[in-house]
Amino acid sequence: MTTNSHPVTYQSPRTHEPPLQLLFNTCKLSIRRATIPSRRDSLRFTSALSIGLAVLFLIIAVGISIIKIISGGIGMPRLFPVITDAASVFDLFTVVPVLMTAYVCHYNVQSIENELEDSSRIRGVVRTSLTLCSSVYLLTSFFGFLLFGEGVLDDVLANFDTDLGIPFGCALNDAVRLSYAAHLVLVFPFTGATGAVCIAFIFPAAIALRDRYNIATKTETILAILKIVLAVLSNAVAIYSDAYALINEKKA
């Protein structure tokens, strides 16, 4: 009897296909970057670059919208939702998880404040960050809806996989997707998307409810319970909408 002495190596299934290979490599790069220990102040360059990439994405979207407005390629978008059945009502709530986790970064405030030479600067840092993020969010949503109208998808990046109807449309599509992918890789250590709801809502609320030193007021206890309920409902809506979309896709 002979045995095979060749070492067994693991190879991810179907990663030889270009799209899957790109996704697989991006995930590996993101996880590897997240595991590299570094101080917050050493991330200032990558943070600035990530903001620049987000602004680049916004500039491209705004530029395409302006070009299509001038050429008459954009019609009047629908301003109000069309409610036809229960499913369309639930579709309105699919934005709730996005809004809840959009600003999940407050757990970085204390560590950043500790590393500032002047801790009083933290107020300006927080206000500037919120103003910048809010501006990018609002402008992206406005011009994304203006550009794609009723055809806008839940993930607006998916819209940049179609013919934009302008010169160099394919190149702009690639630029948008690559810039956003690089942006996610750079900001991954700050966000931790999979644990956003737990970090933002459930963990702080659980600490308040435990109240080890009996210092929590009745109002704080009620707010902690509401935060947990809100987190559970948000996840339930997100899971339901995804499951409903998959079921309808299979039926179609």
Image (cartoon, rainbow, N blue to C red):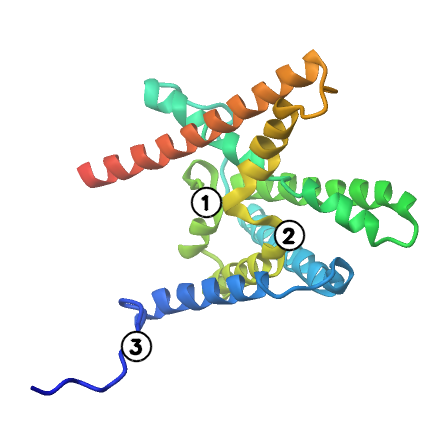
- Residue 117 visible in the current orientation: yes
Residue ID at (52%, 39%): 145
> Which quadrant would the N terminus be assigned to in this image?
bottom left
In terms of secondary structure, where does tag 3 sit? loop
Within 10 Å of disc 2 (Cα), the crowding (few <14, some 14-19, many 20+) is some
Residue at the spot x=53%, y=62% of the render? 30
Q: Amino acid at mark 1?
A: Asp
Q: Secondary structure at mark 1?
A: loop
Q: Give the x, y percent position of residue 183.
A: 59, 59
Residue 72 seen from this side: no
Nearest to viewer (mark 1 / mark 3): 3
Question: Which sits earlier in the primary sequence, circle 2 or circle 3?
Answer: 3
Secondary element under disc 2, as helix, strand or loop, is helix
Reading the image, the residue beneath label 1 is 155
Estimate the x, y position of residue 210 in percent, counting from the top left.
Answer: 62, 25
- Residue tagged 2: 190
The tag on residue 9 is 3
What residue lies at 41% left-to-right and 63% top-to-bottom? Answer: 23
Q: Which numbered tag is attached to residue 80?
A: none
Q: How many marks?
A: 3
